[in-house]
Amino acid sequence: MELKAFFSHVNVALDKALNLKLPTEVSAYLRIGCCLVGCDITDGNAEHLKREHSLTKPYQGVGNQWDFWGSTLVTSSYVRLTPDERSKQGSIWNTVPCYLKDWEMHVQFKVHGSGKKNLHGDGIAIWYTKDRLHPGPVFSNNAHFHGLAVFIDTYSNDDSTDRSFPYISAMVNNGTVSYDHGKDGRSSELGGCSADIRNRDFDTYLAIRYSRGRLTVMVDVDDKNEWKECIDIGGVRLPTGYFFGASAATGDLSDNHDVISMKLYQLMVDHTPEEENLDWTKIEPSVSLFKSPKDNIDDPTGNFRGTPLTGWKVFLLLLCALLGIVVCAVVGAVVFQKRQERNKRFY
């Protein structure tokens, strides 16, 4: 774990270094050196960067590979989804569908404004969905979406919540569930964490990794160049051919919601022949939960509790329990026999 954290630290540092516009040769040598040592651990390498799905300065792909909508303003330094004004909505979407089975998205962003504590909102969402540029009530996107959403919610709508905001959560939807703003999405979230991302003197980072049915969300919000795990969920099924995007919204309260970069990396993962022959575009977005997402209502942490107990898992658990009972019985019998022999010596 320490080695993994080290390379994650190096990767974030390189991302930040590249944003300082170092010479191309310097950046290349840094990337190659890092890859030679730890390319199996860190996937933020230049050769794995998929430029057709990435948004980077000076945003030359905007208007070609990226479309924007609403209040979105594209400058040379950032893409501002909403200004610090009330009732604004904005989004930016990749025009190229992603057919990678395993990927990792790094988002560099900044949320800031004049609002004091608890007087700001509403937040940003990062999307991987079937449809794009489909405005709606969920951070300016469609409520009944198909795919994955990671929400960075900066305002608590539920007065009874015991969570600290801003709060990051994830949701997978097949179009049948709607994000509940009144409860801050608690009934449909798969996991989450609090993250102090607002009005920082530095940029903040979010990493979303999807590989082999596992969704992991990590954050770097303390300017320490290291990832901290926020969400780790197994049993996730996402199709290929969906679109990446980011959106934000303000209501009665507001903030500047800025995206500085979105970098998509291909993860080099081997799949079985059966997986390779599967039509990944036909997969239905889903998550195999041990409990329904609605059970998170009674869980103050909102954390995911594991993957389901399928038939063979139940069998293995019962087998282990039976073996444990047998071992305990044998040990008990041996101990009892030893005591009996010891007692006979005193007669």
Image (cartoon, rainbow, N blue to C red):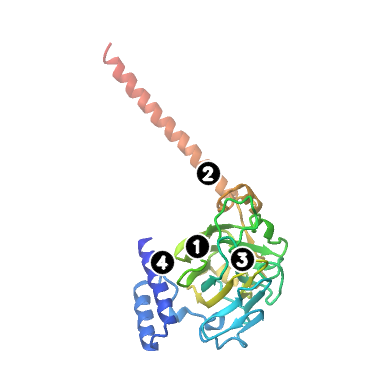
Specify the label residue 196 is tagged with: 1
Vertical side of 78 occupied by 189: above or below:
above
What residue would you read off at disc 3? 121
Residue type beneath disc 4: Glu
Circle 2 residue? 317
Query: Marks 1 and 2, how far apart in space?
Result: 40 Å
Secondary structure at badge 2 equals helix
N-term mark: 4 or 2: 4
Q: Position of residue 76 (x, y in %)?
A: 53, 86
**N-terminal-most mark, 1 or 2:** 1
Query: Counting other residues with Cα less than 10 Å from the Cα at mark 1, is it few (<14), some (14-19), or many (20 or more)?
Result: some
Question: Can residue 280 be seen in this snapshot?
Answer: no
| Labels 4, 2: front one | 4
Residue type (three-letter) at the residue carrying disc 3: Gly
Q: Is residue 291 above or below residue 322?
A: below
- Disc 4 is placed on an element classified as loop
Q: Earlier in the sequence, mark 1 or mark 3?
A: 3
Name the amino acid, label 1.
Asp
Farthest residue to the top: give it: 347
From the viewer's perspective, is the residue at label 4 or at label 3 nearer? 3
* Quadrant showing the C terminus: top left
Q: Is residue 143 above or below residue 288?
A: below
Question: Residue beneath label 4, please?
Answer: 226
224 relative to 130 in the view: left or right: left
